[in-house]
Amino acid sequence: MNRKKVLIIDDEESFCKLVKMNLELDESFKVETATDGKKGLELAKRFKPDVIILDIMMPKMSGFEVLEKIKKDPQTITIPVVMLSAKEDMDFQVKAAQLYDELYLIKPIDAPTLKAKIEEVLARRGIK
Amino acid sequence: MLDVKNIKDSLNKFIIDPLMVVDGQKNICMVNEALRYLVGYKEEDLVGKKVEVIFADSEKSILKRSNVEKLIGTGTILNIESYYQTKDGREVPVLFSSSVMHGQDDSDTWIVCTARDISERKKVEEELRTAYEQIKEAQDQLVQAEKLNAIGLLASGVAHEVKNPLGIIIQGINYLQAKFPGRKEDISNTFSMMMESAKRANSIVNTLLDFAKAKKLEVKLEDINNILDGALELVKANIKFENINIETDKKKNIPHIFVDKNRLEQVFVNLIMNAVQAMSEKGKIFIRSYDKVLSEPKQGISGRDDYFKSGEKVLVVEITDTGEGIPPEVFKKLFNPFFTTKGLHGGSGIGLYVSRNIIDMHKGLIEIQSTEGKGTKVSIFLRVPKREEAE
């Protein structure tokens, strides 16, 4: 079985772990996590996820810097990214939606909703 | 003896301030032209009368009709603010002075009273006082706005920090719910209570963000009547309407406008709940929606001039109740944050404040008209987009 590969990049380690645990309750998911942008970018190239869940407000490298690097690297350019943030900022949403055509979700988000959104993004790519 | 005639001629000629001479029994003996002009009496109306006739009994005055007879003649009085009363009943502020003059024997006493009309000075003082109060009020509002801004920033910062751990808690509960599905009723109830509380905490955080205006709008073209229906359903689900009758008159085919549906629904719920709470036992709430072209510029309660221009098309939602109305002292504070008349458990006092913020963010206006004992009408004005904007 081809498992749906998800990469979570979020500086909140507990959040990464719990999202991974929740998604992997469904055996069709395989989840990897990174707690900063640098590790996330390395993992994106190595793990080759079907979708990346990316937190925006992170220390060192913000989610948008990570997003720009993902979209500039030929190895990762086609991976869809779901932006996730506790900050409901219209500029963020516009930037996420218009520049990169990516989904923007607001924290806190419950597991069923997050899973449904991920599946929606994957379905657009023909991954079921 | 004083030569009254000579004195009178001189005083009429040379003294431009109102002046009178009073004898030892406090009867007016002589008045000059300036005084007659000031108070509008003829000479014969005053001469021979008791001195108090010329004084007003103004509370503002130290030397007034009721005490003047006792006070003048007891010594020199210099520049005391007093009020003369004119023949037609007006009170004229004057700077009063009097001096006692003695003739050859002790019984021969005269009191010379002069007064300077200070109406102009008083008027300027009043204007200055009003200007000062306006500046002070503006300054208070600025300080208040600054404070709110600071609270808003703090609230917004705290809110975002709280949302991250809330996300972890919610994901954790989801995981436990999935791991222990329907095991025991008490376990599933505990999870439900935890989830409900986490969501309630999130809703409180959202209210804080509303307060701080930190939440942005997600606007789409919407039918305002649908939003009103949604709000009514929410209110009806939350409170019982035993003796409150709700009537609606929503215009069909009303233009669609760009609004944030959820935020506007929140405003309508706030306003309808306020209307319900304004009626202690029974009454009627009338909800109306319509569009119109403004015949004159519209200035809202926020005090912005010409916010809507004449000729502009607007959509109006009115929520009218037959409740107790709003007393004037409460009216002034309606939009103050944390102001509530609903007691300890009735409300947070930020409902109207947040509602106005939301309407402000939509570049709309809220207008409130209220008659004590009869009821209150709240009108919301929202801009109708031009055809090309809506397409």
Image: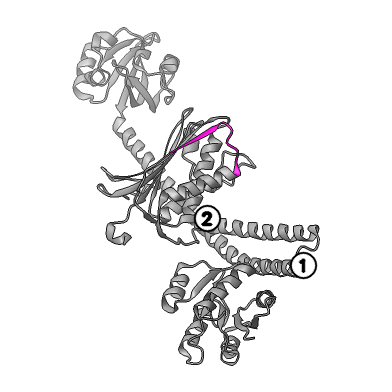
The three-letter amino acid code for the residue at tag 1 is Phe
Q: Of the residues under marks 1 and 2, which one precedes in the sequence?
A: 1
Q: Position of residue B241 (x, y in %)?
A: 57, 36
Q: Which residue is mark 2?
A: B211
Mark on residue B248? Answer: none
Q: Residue at x 58, y 30 (%)?
A: B281
Residue B385 part of the magenta segment: no
Same-chain status of marks 1 and 2: yes
Q: Position of residue B353 (x, y in %)?
A: 50, 49
Q: Residue at x 41, y 18 (%)?
A: B57
**Disc 1 to disc 2, how far (Cα)?**
39 Å
Callout 2: SS: helix
- In the image, the segment drawn in magenta is B238-248
Task: State the colouring used for the structure image.
Answer: one colour
- Residue closer to the observer: B88 or B194: B194
Q: Which residue is mark 1?
A: B180
Q: Quadrant of residue A94?
A: bottom left
Q: Position of residue B87 (x, y in %)?
A: 29, 15
Residue B239 part of the magenta segment: yes
- Mark 1–mark 2 contact, CB under 8 Å? no
Residue that extends furthest to the front in the rendered view of this protein: A1
Task: Tell me if mark 1 has few (under 14), some (14-19) or many (20+) residues whose alpha carbon lies within 10 angstroms of its own.
Answer: few
Q: Is residue B228 visible?
A: yes
